[in-house]
Image: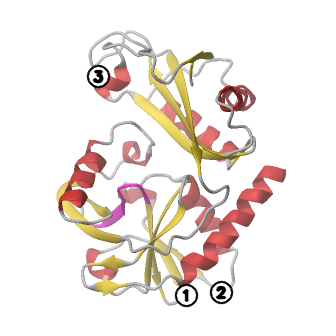
Amino acid sequence: MVNLNGKLFSSEAEILTHKNRGLKYGDALFETLRCIKGDLFFWEDHYFRLMASMRIVRMEIPMEFTMEFLEGEIKNTIVENQLENEAVRVRVTVFRNDGGLYSPLTNTVSYLIEVEKMESPFYLISENAYEVELFKDYYVNRDMLSNLKSTNKILNVVASVYAQENGCDSCLLINTDKHVVEAIGGNLFVVHGDTIKTPPLADGCLDGIIRKKIIEIVEATEAYQFAEESISPFELQKADELFITNSIVGIQPISKYRKKVFKNEIGKNLVGKLNAKARMAQTS
């Protein structure tokens, strides 16, 4: 079952019309997160990112859209799907209500909550091969809209098709300055020795929640140095490790880029710290 504005519908129900602005114009934002037995991973971070994004795109934030209200709606949807004792993937989509062409008739919004069962309650490091390639057909813009978790993801879709056509698991995206920005499904981190580096938001990468948590972990760990700097494609084959982060997988190691095969030592170390951080957030 899915939750549309507080009402529960069968997941097969046809509840959105051809007038939906998320469908017609990509006029929507979304958050994906983990929920483990009723505990939402990093919910406060997700909530405040959603509220900030709604302000940036000039959506009207309803008075009832408190952190407690949306958390309750998510948990109610999980219970109605009989997943309260499971690891759950949650997606909350907020879209401007119907009406208008590019210029909307209203800035009021609706929300849709979807949930599905996951296998693992915590973040795990995959030992499977994961090969990436650079996607150079189209570019990420260096602006604030690129930082948002919006449904304007046609670049990511086309890059995913390119990856499938070329036998890769994912692609790395570049911006208009030809700097590597992120992967199709998350933020990118590059490891050189004890330095862990990720592109700055000014380069156009997603303002990812797990990106933020990894930065906090690295900055608090004496064994590592952190750098938030632009990444040249030429750096990739010189790196010791590459990994991708997002709220569902946590840390996805990259095993191969072109002819370079990468280690996966720091990624394994960080995933334990990430799980510990998630548990601390749940109990605080």
Expressed as whole percent of the image width and height from the top left, the position of residue 32 reads 54, 43
219 left or right of 111 in image: right
Expressed as whole percent of the image width and height from the top left, the position of residue 249 reads 53, 58
Spatial CA span between label 2 and label 3: 49 Å
213 left or right of 239 in image: right
Q: Main secondary structure of the magenta part?
A: strand
Question: Which amino acid lies under the numbered mark 2 shown in the image of this protein?
Answer: Ala
- The residue to which callout 2 is attached is 223
Q: Residues within 10 Å of mark 1 (few under 14, many from 20)?
A: few
Expressed as whole percent of the image width and height from the top left, the position of residue 158 reads 22, 49
Question: Which amino acid lies under the numbered mark 1 shown in the image of this protein?
Answer: Asp
Spatial CA span between label 3 and label 1: 46 Å
SS at mark 3 in the image: helix
* Residue found at x 63% / y 57%: 120
- The residue to which callout 1 is attached is 194
Pointers 1 and 2 in contact (C-beta within 8 Å): yes
Residue 64 seen from this side: yes
